[in-house]
Amino acid sequence: MAKVTLRQYGERQFGGAAGAYGNTTTLRFQLVTIANGSAQNADVSTPIASGDVVDLGPLPEGFRLDDAQILVTTGMTATITGSLGFAYEDGVDDAGVPQDAAYFGAGIDLAAAGRKRTTGSKLVVLPKPARLILTTAVAANAKASAINVLVSGELQGPR
């Protein structure tokens, strides 16, 4: 199992919207794979395999996780599914909010185009910085694909 980290530049994070716009935020994460099945703008050039953990980008401390949507514009190789969740940057569980690789859902079809709603049923506030992770299953990717993940929540700030 490999870990694939995408190079994201934080252009979608504005540090919290105080004032007239409130603290409700939607963060966008993008996974694009090229013809050989590897992730574009990643730290490795090998195709994404079954069981790989794709680090999509940062989730800030104090962010309440309300919902996520996965928009598959161009699907991955047939039968590929995934789990969407989070892992803490320091790798250490928090007693109140443990890391959960399938927090938003498991068995999400990444091969068929469409909007996938996640199945998570609990609200948590991240007590420390985390990473949004997508864990693939069933098969290796061998084609170009385009997937956007939208994570919605409220920026409540560090506790």
Image (cartoon, grey):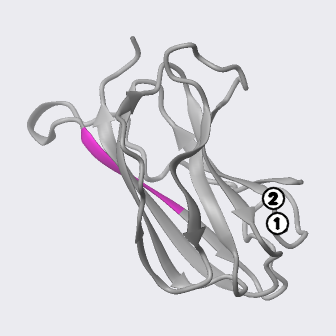
**Residue 50 got which mark?**
1
Residue 104, percent from left and from top: 48, 50
Q: Is residue 27 magenta?
A: yes
Is 2 on the left or on the right of 158, as rendered? right
**Viewer-proximal residue, 88 or 93?**
93
| Helix, strand or loop at mark 2 | loop
Query: Residue at left 80%, top 58%?
Result: 52
**Magenta span: chief secondary structure:** strand
Residue 8, percent from left and from top: 61, 53
Query: Residue at left 59%, top 16%?
Result: 94
| Above or below: residue 108 compared with residue 103 | below
Query: Residue at left 90%, top 69%?
Result: 46
Report the magenta residues as a range: 24-29
**Viewer-proximal residue, 157 or 2?**
2
Report which residue position mark 2 lands on. 51
Residue 139, percent from left and from top: 80, 75
| Above or below: residue 99 compared with residue 28 | above
The amino acid marked with disc number 2 is Gly
Is 11 on the left or on the right of 37, as rendered? left
**Viewer-proximal residue, 125 or 108?**
108
Quarter of the figure with the C terminus: top left
**Viewer-proximal residue, 111 or 19?**
111
Query: Residue at left 64%, top 63%?
Result: 82
The amino acid marked with disc number 1 is Ser
**Residue 144 got which mark?**
none
